Amino acid sequence: MNTSKRPPVDTRRRANSSTGSASARGAAFPRLESATWAWLVPALVALALYARTLGHAFVWDDLDLIVRNAALQGPDWAVLLAQDFWQSTGAGTGMWRPLVTLSYRLDGVLGGWQPWNFHAVNVVLHATSAALVARLALARGLNARAALAAGVVFASAPALCEPVAWIAGRTDGFVVLATLVALLAAARARDSGSRGALLVVALATAVALLAKETALVLPVLLAAQAADARDRAPLGERMRWASAGVSLVVVAGGVVAHRALVGAPAHAGEPGAALGMAALLWAHFAWLTPFVPHVSLLDVWQAPATAMSIAAWLALLALAAGTVALTRRRRAAMLILALLVLPLVPVVAAALLESGVRFAERSLALPAVGLALGLATLAAALPWRRAAWVVVAIWTVAQLVVTVPLVATWRDDEARIRRVVAVRPRDPDALLGLADLLSSQGRANEASELIARAEAVAPSGDASAWVARASTEFRAGRLEPAVAAAEQALARDRGSLAAGVVRV
C-alpha cells in the first residue's frame, strides 16, 4: 500500500499558519534576503552622496581632536581612553567616548594621519546604517518598496550631513549603527529565542555607550520595540523584553565606569530651562525637514515664554497618550515615536547644566531613523497609497536637493563658517568666527569688515568684537591699533583673557 509522505493536514496548517504569522510580523530574517536591493540601494545612495568628502580637509573640532592632539599621535595615546574626551585639548566636558578616540588613533596610524581615511570611515558608517534602516523596516513587516524608501529617506536626510561630512561627528554615526544592530538583534532574539542575539544586543549597547551619551536611552528604545511586538506566543512573551533588560544592565555598568573615570562638571543652568525643555525638543523636529535652512551650528537657545513652554509640555503628553492608544490597537507606533523623541531628551537636558548652549543638527541622527521608518510606515498603511508614495518621493527629492550642496560646505573651515554666516547674517559669533579665520590667513581687510558687522549686531557692552579687532590688528603687525582695541575690550570686560594677552 502506498503511504503518502506528506505530513497530516493539521500539521501542515500549523506550519503554514506559523509561516504566515512570521511574514505578517516581518521578523523572519530569510525574507530579507529576497529583497536585497531594498537595503543595497540606500547604502549606494549614501555612498554616492558622501564619496566626495574623501577629498575634504580637517575642519572645526577635527583640528583640536586630531591634528593638534599630540597625545593622540604619541606613543602613550592609550591613556586618552580613560580620560575626558576633550581633556587632551584643554577642555573638561564630562564626556567619555573612548571608542571614538580609539577609532581616531586607528585611522591615523593606518592612513598616515591624512583626512581622507577619517572621512572614509564616516561614509562607511552612514552607508551601513542606511542599509540597516531598510532591514529594520523589513523586520517590522514593511514590504521591500517601503523598506527601500525608509533607507533612502535616512541616507539623504540633510540633518545627517554634519555627523557624516564632519569627522568629529562620528560619535553619532557609531550610536546610530550600534542602535540599529541592537534593534535587529532584539527582533531575532524575540522570534527565535537565540541567546546569541542577546549577546549581540549587549555588545551593541556597549559600543553605543562608549561612543556618545545619547546611548543612555537605548534600553528604553528596546522596550518600545518590545511593546510594539504583536507576537503573543509563549516564546515571544518570554524573550521580547529580555533585550531591554540586557541593555539596561550594560548601561548601568557603563554609567558606573563613566563616573569613576570622568567627573561631571557643574555649570549654571539656563534660567527657565526645566519648563522650556519641551519647546526645545519640538524645535528640533523642524530641523528634521528639508524645508528649513540647515547649518553646522544652530542658534544659542533661550527659554521661551511660560505659555509656550506649558503648551509644549501638553503637546508632548498628548503625543505620548496617542502613541499608547495606537500601540493598544496593535499599531506599531511605539518604536517610531520613541526614536523621534527619546534621543533628544539628553540633548535638551543640557540646558539644565549650562547656560548659552548651542545645539547642532547631529543631535537628530537617531530621530532621523524614526522619521524614515514613520514615513515609510504611513505610506504603506494609508488607504490612498499612490498619493502617499508621491508625498514620500517629493520629500526624498527635496532632501537630495538640499543635501547635495550642503555636503560641499564641509570641504574646509571657510566654506563651513560662510554657510553659517549666510544662514544667520546677524549672528555676531558666526561673523567673528569667520573674521578670526580670515585674519589668521592674512586677510585683515576682509576680517575688519566682518568685525564691523558683528559690532553692529552685538549686545551693548559686549567685548567680543573689540577682542577680534585687537587680534586682527596684532596679526597684521599694527601694534598701536591692537593695543587700543585691547584696551577697549578690557574696558567692557575686565576678565577678558584674550584682550589681556594681546595688550601684553
Image: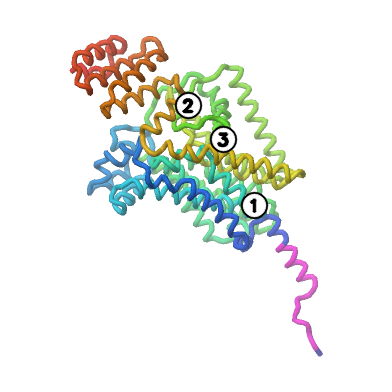
At mark 3, the secondary structure is: loop
Q: Does the magenta stretch include residue 14?
A: yes
Q: Residue at x 28, y 38 (%)?
A: 88
State the CA–CA distance, disc 3 to disc 1. Answer: 26 Å
Q: Do the residues labelled 1 and 2 touch (CB within 8 Å)?
A: no
As drawn, the label of residue 423 is 2
State the CA–CA distance, disc 1 to disc 2. Answer: 39 Å
As drawn, the label of residue 140 is 1
How many neighbours does mark 3 have within 10 angstroms: few (below 14), some (14-19), or many (20 or more)?
A: many
As drawn, the label of residue 290 is 3
Q: What stretch is highlighted in magenta?
A: 2-19
The answer to whether one can see residue 262 in this image is no
Q: Which of marks 3 and 1 is nearer the N terminus?
A: 1
Label 1 vs label 2, nearer the camera: 2
As drawn, the label of residue 53 is none
Q: In this view, does 20 lie to the left or right of 429?
A: right
